[in-house]
């Protein structure tokens, strides 16, 4: 199968033209005229994945390996080390980032993983009813996403409704009305401001909320007769549990 064929399919699922202006989704390594032997889906790429990948594999990732402009290729430094190895092994790469969030990933995680199937979509934001205590809601998120340590800002004891976005959604605060915002990568000052403005936050973590990329995309590929291996790069964070 040629890259051009699967690229057209991916574009029909989540148009690359809908990515954010700062994003770099699309075909990053390879040519549309290239062929490939198998498909591997992953949130990111790391050395272990590339070393163990077969020759002429097509990787489809959520996060683009090449994001900012590369001024040099140094095989001793990331991401050049992976790019060099991928070229040697004739590995191709397509990334689907904000276009995939917008059309598929946000709704998949909220409905299929967390179980909230009734929601209103406002761009990247999904709004839904909760009607639970904050503690019950936060523990539900932690349990369903299997997060050992959940960070949260408890500005309200009861959550009537919430807004949702996978990955890093802090920049979207202020664009919606809700009792609680469920997203990831919240910074200290964002949390402080939210608390003062009576907006509760639940930080799912970036990796934890987007690791379902492969599961989500695989469903759509299978509907079109394509089968892929689902894997994931490692979570760079290590969690330490215990009492002080």
Image (cartoon, rainbow, N blue to C red):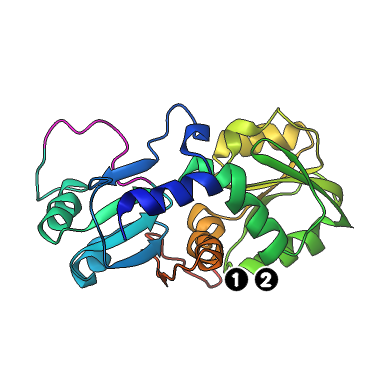
Please state the horizontal and vertical placement of residue 217, each as a whole percent of the image. Answer: 51, 60
The tag on residue 143 is: 2
For mark 2, does the 10 Å Cα neighbourhood hold few (<14), some (14 to 19), or many (20 or more) residues?
few
Please state the horizontal and vertical placement of residue 8, each as a whole percent of the image. Answer: 43, 47
Please state the horizontal and vertical placement of residue 129, each as a whole percent of the image. Answer: 86, 51
Q: Nearer the viewer, residue 45 or 91?
A: 91
Residue at 9% x, 43% y is 74
Q: Nearer the viewer, residue 192 or 75?
A: 75
Q: Main secondary structure of the magenta part?
A: loop
Identify residue for label 1: 146
Q: Nearer the viewer, residue 183 or 115?
A: 115
Residues at discs 1 and 2 in contact (Cβ within 8 Å)? yes
Residue at 59% x, 42% y is 102
The tag on residue 2 is: none
Q: Is residue 184 visible?
A: no
Please state the horizontal and vertical placement of residue 154, each as a whole percent of the image. Answer: 75, 48
Q: Is residue 73 visible?
A: yes
Which segment is the magenta one?
64-72
Residue at 60% x, 55% y is 204
Residue at 29% x, 33% y is 68
Report helix, strand or loop for mark 2: helix
């Amino acid at each position: 199968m040629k890259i051009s064929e699967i690229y057209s399919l991916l574009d029909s699922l989540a148009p690359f033209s809908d990515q954010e202006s700062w994003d770099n989704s699309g075909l990053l390594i390879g040519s549309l005229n290239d062929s490939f032997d198998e498909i591997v889906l992953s949130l990111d790429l790391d050395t272990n994945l590339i070393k163990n990948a077969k020759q002429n594999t097509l990787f489809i990732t959520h996060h683009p390996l090449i994001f900012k402009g590369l001024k040099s290729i140094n095989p001793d430094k990331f991401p050049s080390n992976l790019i060099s190895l991928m070229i040697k092994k004739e590995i191709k790469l397509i990334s689907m980032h904000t276009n995939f969030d917008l059309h598929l990933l946000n709704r998949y995680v909220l409905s299929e993983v967390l179980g909230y199937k009734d929601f209103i979509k406002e761009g990247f934001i999904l709004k839904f009813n909760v009607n639970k205590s904050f503690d019950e809601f936060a523990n539900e998120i932690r349990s369903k996403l299997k997060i050992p340590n959940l960070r949260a800002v408890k500005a309200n004891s009861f959550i009537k409704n919430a807004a949702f976005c996978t990955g890093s959604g802090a920049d979207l605060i202020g664009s919606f009305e809700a009792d609680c915002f469920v997203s990831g990568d919240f910074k200290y000052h964002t949390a402080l401001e939210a608390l003062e403005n009576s907006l509760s936050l639940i930080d799912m973590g970036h990796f934890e909320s987007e690791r379902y990329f492969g599961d989500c995309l695989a469903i759509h590929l299978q509907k079109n007769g394509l089968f892929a291996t689902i894997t994931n790069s490692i979570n760079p964070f290590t969690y330490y549990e215990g009492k002080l």
